[in-house]
Amino acid sequence: MQGGSTSAAVGGGGGATAAAADDDDDTNNKQGITLDETSASSRHDRASRSLSLGERRESNRLGERQGSSSLGASGGGVGRLASSLSSNPTPAVLVRDGSRRSLPSPAVVPFRFEISTGSGSSSASDHSGEEDFTRSLSQRGVPLSAPLAPPAETTSGKLSIYLEYVSALAHLATFGIFGVFIRYGLERLIGIHLADSNNGPLFIDLPANMVGSFFMGWVGVVFKKDIATFSELLAIGLSTGLMGSITTYAGWSQQMVVIITNGYWLRALFGLLLGLEIAQMSLVLGIDSAKLLNWSITRIQQGRANRGLDTLQWASPDNLWRRKFGLVFFLCVSSSLWVSAIVLTIIDTTSIVRRRLWLACVVAPPGVWARWLLARLNGQGIGSKHYFKWIPLGTLLTNMIACTLEAILAVIQIAVQQTDAALLVQGLQLGLLGCMSTVSTFVAELYLLHLIANKRWRAYAYAFIMLICCFAVGVIAYTIPVLTRYSSQG
């Protein structure tokens, strides 16, 4: 028996070595205790109850002698105490290996009892003696559940609500701008060659959606808990900020809407299914590769431990100092990136392509912030009774709003047909709406819904709702005005 969470070790009685003199005591021998030993155990318990705190060392020596004679023969009963009380300001506990450990306070003396039963059996008198002894110590005011050492002082904590909020926005802004750079680079390197035709099912943001969904399996699923242990805000920045900004749902949906407007319905349907399937497969591949890496690290740690070497230690848990450092660091980085993007948008007039990128970096943080705030609606359900709580309502609304704005801006670009207007529209589409909408979070939610064995239909229902709703608002906001304009001109 152990007294709560205590930790001072006590050696129990020896192994079961009792032998009987006649056949009548054979049953008692199998149980590992005799009547004489029972009475000896009772005498030991009564003697222990009458001890004062100043006589405990003498009782320990008495317990050793009794344990070697009566209790040691059976392997049952209450083992001897290996702790001592003294009047020192900082008392110590003598553990089995002979070392001493200091206690935090002389008024708190922890104990731990260990009942050795030899062959694994014990009698009722053993347990009753044990309970009597425990009750005796409790009556004397000795706390049996006191910890051996005071809890380690930790610097873990959080900043004020205002500073935590500012730090979260700084993390999201920094990773959001980086996400825009990565998505733009993938568009220029690969995507522009895939989408060589406005009516093809392959779209310009397909490579970015693949990369973002793949690494979402790392930072958003497999290693998310480990990253959050190191820094909760860093986990939010990597998953919501970076991966959510690398991928974009609005650009993908808008290109399918344009294909439908041009009359290619089957190509648009195939492009929707292809984009969803590739992103989902990229997520699964990322999850499996992350699990493989985690397994490899675990095997390496086990091998080092078996050879007696120091194992690889993960970083310490999140603490107040790290939160303060993260606040200052990401606030400085995000402010520098934001101010630089504004300055470059103004002075870099030689290239419309670069100005589009700088403008996208300027408007990217508000898009990430909007998606992060709307994500709080996930799991809230609809109405006062919270219907359909399993639908990630925040992600659905974010993508629907972004798709609607994307379609409206595309209509404005067609109607105005000016260089500055095109620059503004394309910058907002690349930065604001590209970061506001997300594919990586969408496919991660589908993956988690599909893990529920008896309710996998929810994953398919959610995918259908997302595709239909976003596609419908795009058709209403873009296809109808464009077709109406062309028909009126004709």
Image (cartoon, rainbow, N blue to C red):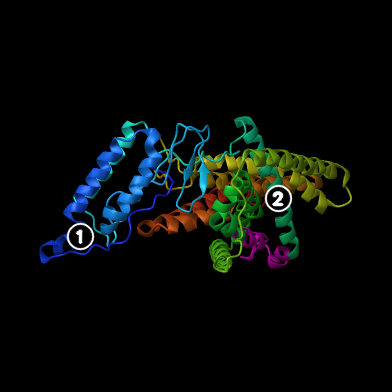
Q: Which residue is mark 2?
A: 430
Residue 26 image point, x, y percent: 14, 64
Q: Which residue is mark 1?
A: 31
Q: Of discs 1 and 2, which sits in the foreground?
A: 1
Q: Nearer the viewer, residue 489 or 407?
A: 407
Mark 2 residue crowding within 10 angstroms, few (<14) / some (14–19) / many (20+): many
Residue 486 image point, x, y percent: 65, 51
Q: Is residue 7 above or below residue 310?
A: above
Q: Is residue 378 visible?
A: yes
What's the amino acid at mark 1?
Gln
**At x 55% / y 46%, what residue is drawn?**
400
Residue 194 image point, x, y percent: 69, 67
Mark 1 residue crowding within 10 angstroms, few (<14) / some (14–19) / many (20+): many
Decide: marks 1, 2 in contact (CB < 8 A)? no
What's the amino acid at mark 2?
Leu
Q: Is residue 278 above or below residue 165?
A: below
Q: Is residue 203 magenta?
A: yes
**Residue at the left extreme of this rendering:** 24
Q: Is residue 142 visible?
A: no
**At x 16% / y 53%, what residue is drawn?**
35
Of the two numbered discs 1 and 2 on the same chain, state the one appearing first in sequence. 1
Q: CA distance from mark 1 to mark 2?
A: 79 Å
Q: Is residue 313 left or right of residue 186?
A: left
Residue 333 image point, x, y percent: 76, 43
- Secondary structure beneath dot 2 equals helix
**At x 19% / y 62%, what residue is drawn?**
29
Q: Nearer the viewer, residue 7 or 292?
A: 7
Q: Residue 315: give its label.
A: none
- Secondary structure beneath dot 1 equals helix
Q: How many marks?
A: 2
Q: Which residues are the magenta region?
A: 190-213
